Image: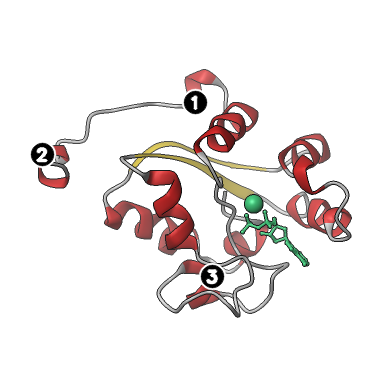
Amino acid sequence: MIKPDGVQRNLVGEIIKRFENKGFTLVGLKMMSVSRELAEKHYDVHKDRPFFGGLVEFIISAPVVATIWEGEGVVAAARKIIGATDPLNAEPGTIRGDFGVSIGRNLIHGSDAIETAQREISLWFSESESLSWEPSLKSWLYE
Ligand code: IDP
Ligand code: MG
């Protein structure tokens, strides 16, 4: 999910391009305003952390772009492409390392495990909004 700062900083194309270029397949995409209920459910695991309130306010403050990506190892690879939570610790070449300076404005959320991804996809998307398709490049991406 490209957070409000990623959208406001005109990085939607740049961020999506990185996942496309890597070889992952975009199977869901929507721009949306996030309800407080969805933001709170999404970050439920952090509800007792001091930053929770500010994080929820931030996520609902302006539109986000939610995406679903498909491919072998995509969840773990996406976390690498995204980089460390604190952009100042994120390696150059990662999204947060290249574009961010502050942990509360780190541009993008990525699911941290397959089970989390399943939960988050069902939270953010209806079934008809997820469109699995066969990339014609597949045999050039996988042996
Ligand atoms: P992640 O996004 O890399 O998975 P999490 O630890 O799951 O990082 O935290 C969720 C989000 O909460 C982070 O992306 C960041 O925006 C915010 N966050 C985490 N720790 C802090 C903090 O110490 N201060 C402010 N915001 C934080
Ligand atoms: Mg997380």
Nearest-to-viewer mark from 1 and 3? 3
Q: Nearer the viewer, mark 1 or mark 2?
A: 2
- The residue drawn where x is 56% and y is 45% is 111
Looking at the image, is mark 1 or mark 3 earlier in the sequence? 3
| Percent coordinates x, y for residue 7 in the rendering | 59, 59
Determine contact: label 3, label 2, CB under 8 Å.
no
User: Mark 1 near mark 3, Cβ–Cβ under 8 Å?
Assistant: no
Image-based side of 56 in relation to 91, left or right: right
Residue beneath disc 2:
139
Is disc 2 placed on a helix, strand or loop? helix
Say few, some or many: other residues with alpha carbon within 10 Å of mark 2 (under 14 / 14 to 19 / 20 or more).
few
Q: How many marks?
A: 3
* Amino acid bearing label 3: Arg
Q: Is residue 47 left or right of residue 100?
A: right
Q: Which circle's residue, 3 or 2, is located before the other in the chain?
A: 3
Q: Nearer the viewer, residue 105 or 115?
A: 115
Name which of mark 1 and mark 2 comes first in the sequence: 1
Residue tagged by mark 3? 96
Mark-to-mark CA distance, 1 and 2: 26 Å
| Distance Cα–Cα, label 3 vs label 2 | 31 Å
Residue at 77%, 49% (x, y): give it: 60
Dot 1 corresponds to which residue?
129
In front here: 138 or 67? Answer: 138
Pinpoint residue 39: horizontal percent, then vertical percent: 76, 42
| Residue that appears at 78% across and 57% down | 58
Above or below, comparing residue 8 to residue 26 in the picture: below
For numbered disc 3, what is the local secondary structure?
helix
Vertical side of 58 occupied by 28: above or below: above
Q: What's the residue at 10%, 41% (across, down)?
A: 143
Q: How many residues crowd mark 3 within 10 Å: few (<14), some (14–19), many (20+)?
A: many
- Outermost residue, top side: 127
Q: Looking at numbered disc 1 in the image, what kind of residue is underneath it?
A: Glu
